[in-house]
Image: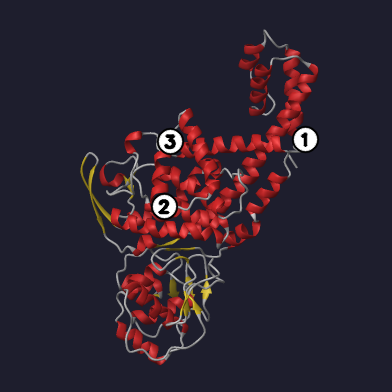
Amino acid sequence: MAYVGYEHLRESLRLTALPVARPAQVRSVTRVESTDTHLAIPRHVAPASEHPLDHLLFAFKHEGMNLAIACEALHNINPSDLIAQLQVSPNGAYIRKACYLWEQFAGRHLEGLPEVGGPTEPVFDPDRYVTIGEVKRDRRWRVAFNGLGTVRYCATVERTPMVHAGMASDVMGRAIDFAKRLPKPTLDRALAWAYLSETEDSFAIEREKPSADKAEAFVQLLKQAHQARPLSEEYLVDLQNSVVTNPMVREVQFRVEQNWLRGPARGALGITYVPPAPALADELMNELMAVANHLPQKVDPVIAAAIASFGFVFIHPFMDGNGRLSRFLFHHAMCLSGALPDGLLLPVSVAMKRHEDDYLTTLQSFSKPARARWKVRWISDADYEFSFDASSALYRYWDATACVEFSYRMAEQALEHDLRGETLFLTQYDRVLRTVNERYDIPGKDLATILMGAFDQHGTISKARRRRFEHLISGEALDFIEAAVRNAMATDDGAD
């Protein structure tokens, strides 16, 4: 079946942009039909010619906005063809978008234009994409850029059923309501657990275990996120210095050499991801920081957090510490939005660690195809030669939909499974502690050890632990503790 629209442009112009998830194809249908794998197009709706501009305008109308392909395609379209089409339909929404984007990408104006009219047209259809509300309109083309970024760096988020559900779930509002209904001592203990667990699991994802001092430093870093300090290179360098465990890899600026990630395979096959070259990374970080500093006030905080977090790790501006910093930026965006009261934390890294395979899959939705655009030659040991065989649009304009969907799932898990689960545990623990203390006189530290073990084993005290304490605590008391724990866990009344 013949491709039309974006995928036709990709193939016919040999563009380096990533493949379209659901390419448009001419099929034996009577109307445009969307499926999980493609967009079926009736022959009479398909572009009448093979000209790139016809396919681009078709794509704008039927496939939405793909800035990465549009950017590359417009570099292959003669300005005279744009002007000729504009003269035919000077009020046309899609040709006006094409002309506006051509000027933005080329950095110069088209000349000899007819008078342009028509209502102001958003670049992104707000019914199809998550967009920002208040935008600056281009009076020349009557076009408004309403994307989640700028024409130099922009993520897109489709309004999929999962994104719709995430936005409607109001996880932030529910987290605030949950915290308000907890007694302060219980909330303080739950948050102390959340900060420490968030720290340990963020390091664990990187296969590291922080020292006590490093863990405490990261906890304080998470708490400082509530200061909502705007991102800057200086601030991110300070953060990088705080999260790396090896003082030899602390940075003083964004990286000035090529970075890469590798897996267990030998040579070039072991390179799993190559971020943008240093000069491009520096440019994109300036764009991302500007986006991350204003987006949390304009869209749902989880969406802003996903774009800041994943966008950062895809650019990889440091030689080390990028993963931990990216997860810190998730919290930074939440706090910058003003949606979280001071001190409240959703332990998303705890959820990510538990769903590590899903986290890796989400990262690979971009990193795998991006890696294919690099030619890597292994020279010796850790010495490689890298050649980028693509347009910078690959890194400038990326689809964040999968990242946002994953982030909503993790935020939901962090609230419902982790925060509520820890609060439930604390409530049950306190109740059992009171019950046991009313009947038996057991040293506090010993009782705490026994109770923790019994809760971990769903109401059973292991034989080894029984032998350890049999000279201090009777078998009757241990049986009573087991029964009390099982009863507390069975009631499941939690903190509500």
Marks 2 and 3, how far apart at CA? 28 Å
Is residue 38 depicted above or below 368 in this figure?
Answer: below
Say what secondary structure mark 2 lies in: loop
Q: Residue at x 27, y 60 (%)?
A: 389
Residues 266 and 391: in front is 391
Is residue 28 depicted above or below 342 in this figure?
Answer: below
User: Residue 55, position in %: x, y?
Assistant: 39, 79
The answer to whether residue 86 shows anywhere in this view is: yes
Q: Is residue 306 left or right of residue 273?
A: right
The answer to whether residue 461 shows anywhere in this view is: no
Marks 1 and 3, how far apart at CA? 37 Å
Indicate the amino acid at tag 1. Thr
Disc 2 target residue: 232
Q: Is residue 220 left or right of residue 243?
A: right
Mark 3 crowdedness (10 Å alpha carbons): few <14, some 14-19, many ≥20: few
Disc 1 target residue: 491
Marks 1 and 2, how far apart at CA? 50 Å
Circles 2 and 3, Cβ within 8 Å, touching? The answer is no
